[in-house]
Amino acid sequence: MNLKRSIIVALAAVTLGGSIAAWTISTANATNPVVSEEPAAAAGMTYGSPDLKSANTLTFGPDSVLFIGDSQSGAIFAIDVKDTAKDSSATPVEIKEIDKKIASMLGTTPDQIVINDMVTHAASQNIYLAVSRGRGANAMPVLLRVAKSGAIEEVKLSNVLFSKVALTNLPGHAEKTRWGANKRAMSITDMAFMDGQVFVSGLSNEEFASSVRRIPYPFGSEIAATNLEVFHAAHNRFETEAPIETFLPFRMKDQAVLLASYTCTPLAAFPLSDLKEKKLVRGTTIAELGGGNRPLDMIAYQKNGKDYILISNSDRTLMSINAEDVERAQPLTTGVGAAYLTAGVKYVSVAEVGVLQLDNLNANHAVAIQRNIDDGSLNLRSFPKRWL
C-alpha cells in the first residue's frame, strides 16, 4: 500500500519534527558498497543485495524509491526500482488469473503464491506486488512489476541501490496475540510516505502494543514511536493490543490526521500533532463498520468533484464513505449493543466482494486484486471510480 493519493494535498505541508523514542538504525550490508552519483544515492543508498526475509507492505516515496516492510527481519528497506516510465492516460488494466501466471513464472503452483501487498507507481502506472513464494518458514519474498499491457516481470533485488533501517522493541517470532495471531507478522501492518517520513503501523513488545512509528527519510539517527489506544464500539471497551490494519493520511475538521481502520471494524482518527508530541494517543472512533470483519485496504479517491474513502474487507463488500460525512463525524463513546451492528459515519455498500488489495491506478480507475468467488483464483481488476 502507498500514500494512497491522500485527498488533501495540504498534508504535504505538515511538519512532523521531533521524536518520542529512540530506535536503532542499521546500515545494510552491501556486497558492492560503491556509492553512485545518482540522485537515490544521495539519500544514503549503496549498491548491494537487500537481505529481505519477507515482504509484507509496500509504499512509494520520492521518485522511484519503493519502501518494503519486512516484519520477519524487523526492518524497512528503501529500494530504487528505477521506474522512469510515464503514463498520463486514464485507461484500465485487467489480468485474469494473475496468481496462476505468477505461479507459472516462479515455477510453483497457485496455492503456494500469496500476494501480500500492491502499490501503483503514480507516474508510470506500473503496479508492484509483494509476493511470497511458498508458505510458512520457507516462504521466499519476491517483488514483481506488472505493466498495464499485462506483462509481469520480477524486480531483481541484487546489485540495486538500497538502504535499510532496523526497528527495535518488536515482538518475538513465536509470540501470539490473545486471539491467536502471530505478533511478529503484525509488527508491520501498513505504511505511507508523507512529508519526508515513512509512517509504519503495527505491534511493538510494549504494554500498549499498538503503535505508529515515524521514520525520517533519508534514513537517519532518530525514529519516533507512539503507542495507540482506541475505543472499540463492537466490543464496548478500549483496545491497546490490536494494531491498525490499514490507514491513510487525511484532513478532518481542519486537522491533519491518520484515518485508521482496525479488525472488527472500528474506524478512528489520530491527530498527527498528537503523534508528534505524545507517547500515548487515544484515537477518536468515528464509525463502527461491523464485527467479524477485517479491513484489508483503504484509499482516498475523487468522483464528480467530491472526495471519498474506499475500504476493502475480508467479510464485507467494498465500503464507500463520503469525506464530508467524515468531516461531520461525532465520536463514538458507547458500545453498539451487538457485534454485527454499525454506528457512526455511514457508508455505501459497493457490490464487490473478495477485494484483497486496493490502490488508485489513475484519475478514472482504482485497481484491485480480487478473489473469484467461483474458483478461488485471483484477478487483477480495474474499477471505474464513477461506479464506486
Image: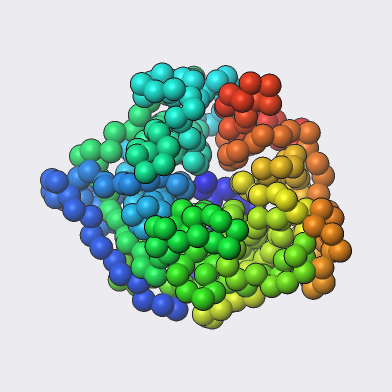
**Is 368 situated left or right of 62 in this image?**
right
Residue 76: x and y, percent? 37, 55
Q: Is 135 or 191 nearer to us in this picture?
A: 135
Residue 95: x and y, percent? 55, 21
Residue 239: x and y, percent? 65, 70
Q: Residue drawn 33% across and 54% down?
A: 73
Rendered-image quadrant of the C terminus = top right
Give the number of callouts.
Answer: 0
Q: Residue drawn 70% across and 49% down?
A: 293
Residue 197: x and y, percent? 44, 62
Relative to residue 330, is residue 152 depicted above or below? above
**Is 166 situated left or right of 30 in this image?**
right
Q: Residue drawn 32% across and 60% down?
A: 165
Tell me if residue 319 can be seen.
yes
Tell me if residue 289 can be seen.
no
The quadrant where residue 130 appears: top left
Query: How did the renderer colour the structure?
Result: rainbow
Q: Is 364 or 28 nearer to us in this picture?
A: 28
The quadrant where residue 55 appears: top left
Relative to residue 148, is residue 163 depicted above or below? below
Q: Residue drawn 64% across and 75% down?
A: 282
Relative to residue 75, is residue 115 depicted above or below? above
